[in-house]
Every structure is written in structure tokens, then in C-alpha cells.
Image (cartoon, helix red, strand yellow):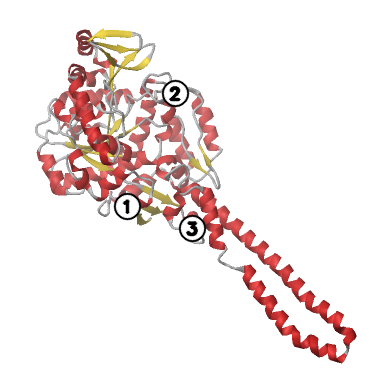
Amino acid sequence: MTKEECSFQQLPFSKLFNTYVSDYDKLSDFYSANPFNDVEVRERIDRIGEFKNRSSIADAFQEYHAYLGIELSQSSQLEKFRNEDALVFVTGQQLGVYGGPLFTIYKTITSILLARKWEKDLGKPVVPVFWLADEDHDFEEISSIGIPESDSFSKPRLNESGDGKPVSVQSITDSITEFRESLKELIFDTDFSEELWAKLDECYQPGKTHVQAFAQLMDFLFAGEGLLIVGSNTNSLKEIAKHVFVKSITEAEKVHESLESQSALLEKDFHRQVVVGDSNLFYLDAEEGRLKLERSGSEWKAGSITLSEEKLVKLIEANPGKFSPNVFLRPVVQDVLLPTIGYVAGPGELAYYGQMKELYPLFDLEMPVIYPRLSATLIESGIERIMEKIPFEFSFYNQRIEDLEAAYVDHAKTKDVEKMFSIWKDEISDSSDYPVSFIKEIDPTLEGTVGKVVAGFSNELDKLKGRVYRSIKQQEQTQLTRIHRIKTQLFPDGLQERSVSPVYFMNKYGISIWNELLQELGSEDLKLNTHHIIKI
């Protein structure tokens, strides 16, 4: 593997994200510490203080691992977490089928490498944690994957729909077989295919829930690297964190004001990622699914259910498993259950954390350090070779294919064929004046014949010019085809990392490719303030 870098400013990232990674001081009012300043991070670590309920939380995680089917391979990580001095780096993602997009892998690698760095620097256990987004209910977002082909981009999708309940509790159906076969038609067999399909089939079996399948795949890929896998959609964990749910109701106005005031400030120069509502809690109804709780005067409503605040609080106290946090409350629950140094975020997550700094103190917490995840594009050798034949830089391929084609055609027109042939014709015409005059003096009857010969020169030049134009067109088409192929690989549907499935690369380079990448990136300081171009 070889690596190059590309500035985020040349790529489709927001103003907020670009400012965060290049000029953090302009955003320091919205975050707890600069992730690129180890002194600030260490000061934030010193403020973490005593972590409560560690043993109970670890027991609940162990129970969850048993349900997920990963208890044996997670045992050593969990024991490390039980150490009274242990801290964590966290990342997380939705339960995308077959692992979701590439950035899921990159977030995980980042958390592992940060944990290793700070464990060495602090001289105490630091555990990388993957938080399963097991409360999310948007089945549409997790049910497809992206596969680049030679000149197109395919997105096979599970032929089913969600039921409004958290994706984690939905079972995999027989449609996984159809999905698998449609995917196999898009990627050719390699020496690694048999092992890959065996592992995917082992994880994604009808009858398992999506959270079990996703957790087992991530466990297979990264348990050996020390990754601890956790989530919150269990009764025992929600029992520990239920005070967060209660306070979000009893102090709803303070919660709303903390989020809205910070969001309004952020919006002056940047943008708010998430709209702030009156409530940050969902009710899980057996029939109607995951319903957002809404304030209505002194009462709270969720679908057809209406409760007074007093009754709602009693219901939370008695059965916290019936409730689920939203995008703002989930990080708070996470940091109640984990002694968090930092969270590894995608650009969107980083943006909504900027709305949350004043929320944390309401729950006697401080926001963790927010680290941007590794951002990277993998370039295969075949793509690298044809990129060398096109006069475009990597970032230029972020444009629409129509704009890329137009730019290349404009570039090709620098070869001024018309001008060259015009000059050639003029030179032939000028050089013909003397021979024509000379022959005419000898025999005037040959004047017509001489004129035909001279005209023939011009006709032959026109024929040759046509052939030159056809050759240029053919060459252009070859290059335009190459441009399509490069675009499909690097920016198929936005950045490669946001749209392409890890399965594509695992099939071609082996299921250990991510461990190899992790080892390669761990051999030097990990740069998180630039986009990496990795040639494989």
C-alpha cells in the first residue's frame, strides 16, 4: 500500500467540518477539547473522574454478548473494561446489511488506533468500543449496499421493508438469499470469495436479528484487534441509564433550551445538523413501533397514547426498556454507560455534537473529545494505471460525469487540427504558383490538367483531415470510457467511503484487508485532518 493526501477543502465536506479540522479555535465554544492537541485531550481525560456502576454495566454487556452470540470472542475485551482504571474510545454506526458502507470500517479502525495510542501515553487500559446503533428504526437506510462495476454503480437491496420498530429487533428473512445471489452476480469469483461468502452466510442467516448478524460480522473482523462491541437496547442497560430518560422529561424545557441556544449560535456561521424538537425520547409500542414522544401542554403523546408527565415518569421508572433515545440523547446514554475519552465521528455526527455542548452538564457529564474518523479512498492498481493517462487530479473526479466529459473534450481541442491543415493548404497553394505558370508557358493546353492535380492535393488533405478527426474521436472515446470507470470507482455516489460496501474489496483482496490496513496505518501517526488516498 502507498498513501497520498488530499485536502478536505477539495472534496465535498461542509464548512463546519473543514473549519473543525483546519482551524479548531473558531469552533472551540461548541466542543470540549481540540482532538489535534494532546495537551487539551489530556486535560479532558483528567476531568473524567470516577466511573460509577462499572461492574453492573460490564455484567449487562456480557449478557448482551450472549444474546448477540459473541460472548467468547468478547470476553478478554470485557475483562479489560472491568479494570477500574480503564477508559474507552467509542465509535458507532447503523446496522447496515453486510457491514454497511466503507466508513463503518474506517470509524472502527480509527477508534482502535486512538485507543492504542492513548493506552501507551497514559499507561492505563484504553478500550476501543463499537456502539451498535441498535435503537435506530430506519430500515430503508440500512437495507442496501453499493458495488462499483466497470462503468456503472449498482445498489442491490433487500427485498423487504421495515415495520417501524428498531432495526435491531427485526429478523432476517429468506430474502437474504435473493439479496446474496444478486450481489454475487455483480462481483466475480476470486481466491477469496468462498471464505467471504461462508462468513457472510454464517452471520446473516434467516431467523437471526439484524443486530446479531451485524455484531457477529464486526466481531469476526475486529475482535482480534481488541474491539469491544456494545449497545443500549437491552432492559438491563436501560435500567442503569433510566435517570437520563426521566430527566429528559422532567427537565424538557431546560434540555430544549440547551440544544436550541447552542444550535442558534452555531447556525450564525455554520449550520445546524439536526432540528431541535420538544422531546428527545421515543416510546416503543408493540403494535405501532418506535413513536416519538411529543409534548402537548402538560401531557405527553406518542401515537394514540396520551400520558401526564407524572404517569410517564412512573412508566419510565417501571419499564425503561419501553423507551429509546433520539440522536441527541443517545450520546448521553452512551457516556453514562462508558468512561469515554473520545468519540470517533463522521462529518454529520461531528456537526450535531456541536449542538450538544450545553446538554451534557444537565446530566452531570462533559462532552467527550470528538475525533473525525479516518477518511480515505482506496485506489486499485488498474484504476491507478488509467488515471495516469488522464490529465485530471484525484479531487477533480468529484464532479458530475457530464462535466468531466466536457472538461476532457475541451482539453483535447488544444490540438488545433483545423489550423494546421489550413496552413498546410496555403503552403501547397503558394508553392504551386511557379510550377503552374512554368507548365502553362510550355503548353497552355495542360493548364486544366495542372489545376486538377493541384485541386487533388487539396482533396487528399481533406480526406486526411477527416481521418485525423476520426482518430481523435476514437481516442477521446477511449479516454471518456476510462473517465467513466475512474469516476465509478472513486466517486460512485459521492465519496467512495460513503457508498461502497467493504464486501467489494474483501472479495478482491481477502477478508483480512482491514487488518492489513489497520497495521499499515498504525505504523505511523494517524492523520485525521486530511483525506487519505491509499493505493492497493
Amino acid under disc 1: Glu
The quadrant of the rendering that contains the N terminus is bottom left
Name the residue tied to disc 2. Answer: 172
Is residue 411 depicted above or below 167 in this figure? below
Residue 422, percent from left and from top: 66, 73
Q: Nearer the viewer, residue 533 or 68?
A: 533
Q: Are marks 3 and 2 in contact (CB under 8 Å)?
A: no
Q: Would you say 80 lies left or right of 173 here?
A: left
For badge 2, the amino acid type reads Ile
Separation of disc 3 and disc 2 at Cα?
A: 41 Å
Query: Which badge, 1 or 2, is on the more N-terminal residue?
Result: 2
The residue lying at 30 percent from left, 40 percent from top is 224
Do the CB atoms of the residues marked 1 and 2 lie less than 8 Å apart? no
Residue pointed to by mark 1: 520
Q: Amino acid at mark 3?
A: Met
Lower position in the chain sequence, tag 3 or tag 2: 2
Residue 30 makes an appearance in the image: yes
Q: Residue at x 49, y 40 (%)?
A: 147
Residue that numbered label 3 is attached to: 387
| Label 3: few (<14), some (14–19) or many (≥20) C-alpha neighbours in 10 Å | some
> Tag 2: Cα neighbours inside 10 Å, few (<14), some, or many (≥20)?
many
